[in-house]
């Protein structure tokens, strides 16, 4: 990449190099709306000799003005001699139908379009025109809403959207610098009137009302201050995330969270790392992520919840307090008990699983016998002691069984409580039965009934896998 005396080009070049956003002459898709920021992004990337392509999404707004934006951007791409990719939708109508705000649905639609262009072109890097003033507004909005260290980092120079790399090369450039750069070179752009409307969105009120007031009355370089805070916080976040990964591996909490999370292991995490762990889990399951929710998880649920307590964390998800452990479960509508006969031998799809039944001789068991061969998803039974056709069903009121290794019978409900099985999941646990007797609580424990003994000659083996595996 050639050195330039153009200060703005050198600023963007520095951002790209420090954050490893692009290789020299790399292919990149620029998301261009036609406004000053994205127009500057396009021309800067072209002048830095990247193989740039243009993607434009038409929101079908402003009585046809957005369509003229699309034509303007197409002409800009044509003059530069770069590929142009267009998309669009009636975002306002779609937002109403989906019950979302216009801004939220517009963002979803834009990113879906950019992912589509990336997939169709095979270009895995998309550049956005967010600049330093956008970053300052984002940090201030998060402070006002309530955020912790991760949120204070603002928008990242690089983040992944699936397999697509989303980059922001202009994060150290002011909006007025971009406009001046365009004007000096005679490059025109289109103004979106909605950006100047204080009633359009909360961000615009912060941009046009609060930020100027803070700059006038408190700190004339408030935008640089907030953007600098974000840069510093990104370094802190990187270190803390690395420490969290290391501690989770040591304590058995990651990278994939187990179904039952031991509370003792969680309590051994430093509070700063544990708060980040909570954020990760809430994001993973699609729950609500906010300062208040993390505080409630940390100081309320973890410390004060009793065995059997549930906590709604949003997004149709529950946090469940078991005996010495917690678990995240997805709340689903309660369904009536199900019962289906199994093919013997053969495969049967039921209860979101596939059950494979085979007949074999006890002599076919490997060394170590049934105890070594069986797993939570594979069990063998004494064929001579199975008292009727095999069925798979869900639990019913009053269910009892005789767990292997325990004396007498036990209520299935009590067994689930003792094992810390979250209440919303209990109706989904498959039960293998024969002649009305529970032979196996799938994933947990078999019954004494039909258990293999030294006198067993013939076996019925049942293996379970999730549907689709």
Image (spheres, rainbow, N blue to C red):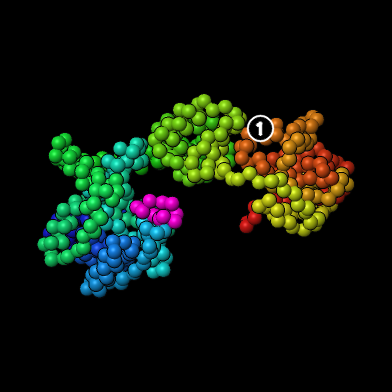
Question: On the picture, is 334 further left or further right than 8?
Answer: right
Instruction: Indicate the position of residue 205 as horizontal and vertical percent values.
Output: 25, 45
Q: Is residue 246 visible?
A: no
Work out whether residue 388 or residue 274 is closer to the camera in this orientation and state it. Answer: 388
Q: Is residue 391 magenta?
A: no
Q: Residue at x 56, y 44 (%)?
A: 330
Rendering quarter of residue 114:
bottom left
Of all residues, the one furthest to the front in this rendering is 63
Name the one closer to the observer, 211 or 152.
211
Q: Which residues are magenta?
A: 95-105
Does residue 178 appear to the left or right of 371 in the view shown?
Answer: left
Find residue 182 and report its horizontal and vertical position in percent: 15, 61
Q: Which residue is mark 1?
A: 417
> Is the magenta region chiefly helix, strand or loop?
helix
Q: Nearer the viewer, residue 39 or 346?
A: 39
Residue at 17 percent across and 43 percent down: it is 212
Q: Position of residue 317 (x, y in %)?
A: 53, 42
In reply to whether residue 97 is colored magenta, the answer given is yes
Q: Secondary structure at mark 1?
A: helix
Expressed as whole percent of the image width and height from the top left, the position of residue 255 reads 50, 44
Q: Is residue 446 above or below residue 309?
A: below
Q: Residue furthest left?
A: 184
Q: Residue at x 70, y 34 (%)?
A: 413
């Amino acid at each position: 990449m050639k050195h330039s005396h153009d200060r703005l080009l050198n600023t963007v070049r520095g951002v790209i190099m420090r954050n490893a956003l692009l290789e020299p002459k790399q292919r990149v898709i620029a998301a261009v709306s036609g406004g000053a920021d994205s127009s500057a992004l396009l021309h800067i990337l072209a002048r830095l000799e990247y193989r740039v392509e243009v993607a434009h999404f038409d929101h079908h707004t402003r009585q046809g003005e957005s369509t003229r934006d699309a034509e303007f951007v197409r002409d800009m791409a044509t003059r530069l001699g770069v590929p142009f990719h267009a998309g669009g939708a009636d975002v306002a109508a779609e937002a109403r139908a989906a019950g979302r705000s216009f801004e939220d649905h517009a963002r979803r639609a834009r990113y879906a379009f950019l992912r589509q262009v990336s997939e169709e072109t095979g270009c895995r890097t998309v550049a956005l025109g967010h600049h330093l003033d956008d970053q300052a507004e984002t940090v201030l909005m998060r402070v006002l809403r309530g955020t912790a260290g991760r949120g204070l980092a603002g928008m990242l120079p690089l983040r992944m959207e699936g397999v697509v790399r989303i980059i922001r090369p202009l994060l150290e450039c002011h909006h007025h610098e971009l406009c001046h750069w365009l004007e000096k070179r005679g490059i025109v752009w289109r103004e979106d009137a909605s950006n100047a409307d204080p009633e359009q969105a909360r961000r615009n009120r912060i941009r046009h009302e609060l930020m100027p007031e803070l700059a006038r009355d408190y700190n004339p370089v408030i935008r640089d201050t907030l953007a600098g805070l974000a840069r510093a916080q990104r370094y802190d976040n990187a270190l803390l995330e690395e420490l969290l990964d290391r501690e989770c591996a040591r304590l058995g909490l990651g990278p994939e969270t187990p179904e039952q999370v031991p509370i003792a292991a969680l309590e051994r995490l430093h509070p700063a790392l544990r708060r980040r762990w909570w954020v990760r889990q809430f994001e993973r399951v699609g729950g609500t992520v906010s300062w208040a929710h993390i505080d409630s998880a940390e100081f309320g649920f973890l410390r004060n919840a009793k065995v059997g307590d549930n906590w709604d964390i949003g997004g149709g998800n529950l946090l469940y307090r078991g005996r010495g452990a917690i678990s995240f479960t997805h709340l689903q509508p309660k369904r009536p008990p199900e019962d289906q006969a199994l093919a013997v031998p053969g495969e049967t799809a039921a209860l979101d699983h596939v059950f494979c039944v085979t007949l074999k001789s006890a002599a076919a068991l490997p060394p170590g016998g049934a105890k070594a061969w069986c797993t939570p998803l594979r069990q063998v039974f004494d064929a001579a002691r199975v008292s009727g056709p095999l069925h798979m069903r869900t639990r019913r009121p009053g269910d009892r069984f005789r767990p292997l290794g325990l004396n007498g019978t036990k209520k299935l409900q009590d067994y689930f409580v003792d094992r810390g099985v979250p209440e919303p999941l209990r109706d989904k646990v498959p039960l293998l039965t024969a002649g009305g007797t529970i032979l196996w609580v799938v994933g947990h424990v078999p019954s004494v009934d039909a258990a293999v003994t030294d006198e067993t000659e013939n076996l019925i083996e049942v293996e379970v896998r999730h549907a689709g595996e």
